[in-house]
Amino acid sequence: MVWAEPAERRIPPILFGTVVFLASELLLFGGLFAAYFALRARAAAWPPPGVELDPVLPSIGTALLVASSATYQAGVVAGRGERLGGLRRWVAATFLLGAAFLVVQAIDAARLGFTVSSDAYGTMFYALTGAHALHVAAGLVLMLLVLLRAAQGAYRGGRVEGAHAVGLYWHFVDAVWIGLYATLWVLR
């Protein structure tokens, strides 16, 4: 009986690096959430009196981000199936949903009655939502790079590791928002 060596299965370096990077991002957001809950535990009233958060726009934003994760994943699946037109269309749709999320978030922030310097609550609210908004903006830049690379002929033969890595980042940003939404608008 001859034993055959199993085929070597390696994680592509870009995906491994992305997972390591996301672990560091998890520490960043974990620290922000820890600070929020530590301040909340010590505060007499949280949020402070006079702080009113209307959940309508953040709920719309949440729906946009959840939808954007689905559209991005549809793009990666299309790319794996060598349907590059589908990859481009789904990533472009995801870009538009992510940009709409940022617009909704900006409109919501503009109508709030407190600032980053109002109190500890304002500081943590804007630190959390601002850090997340920066990550969404970075994701949008990454999507533009995916679209540019696709236009240059990348991702042929179903080799979409780079687009997949951006998808992992985007899904992470989406998951962080769900945690933020639950923390800031549901748990309060």
Image (cartoon, helix red, strand yellow):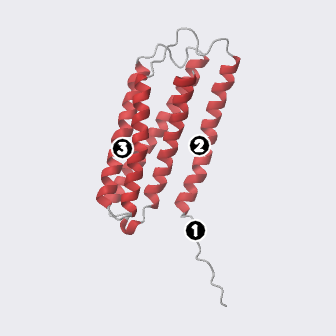
Q: Residues within 10 Å of mark 3 (few under 14, many from 20)?
A: many
**Mark carried by residue 25:** 2
| Residue 133 image position (x, y, % from top left) | 47, 34
Which of the 4 image quadrants contains residue 128? Answer: top right
| SS label for mark 2 | helix
The quadrant where residue 65 appears: top left
Q: Position of residue 114 (x, y in %)?
A: 50, 14
Q: Secondary structure at mark 3?
A: helix
Left or right: residue 132 versus residue 65 is right
Q: In the rendered structure, which amino acid carries the disc numbered 3?
A: Phe
Q: Residue at x 65, y 25 (%)?
A: 37
Measuring from the top left, give residue 66's x and y in whole percent.
43, 39
Residue denoted by label 3: 95
- Residue picked out by circle 1: 10
Left or right, 81 with respect to 40, comes to left
Q: CA distance from mark 3 to mark 2?
A: 21 Å
| 3 or 1: tag closer to the N-terminus | 1
Residue in the image at 67% along x and 11% along y: 44
Q: Quadrant of residue 38?
A: top right
Report how many numbered discs are placed on residues in the image: 3
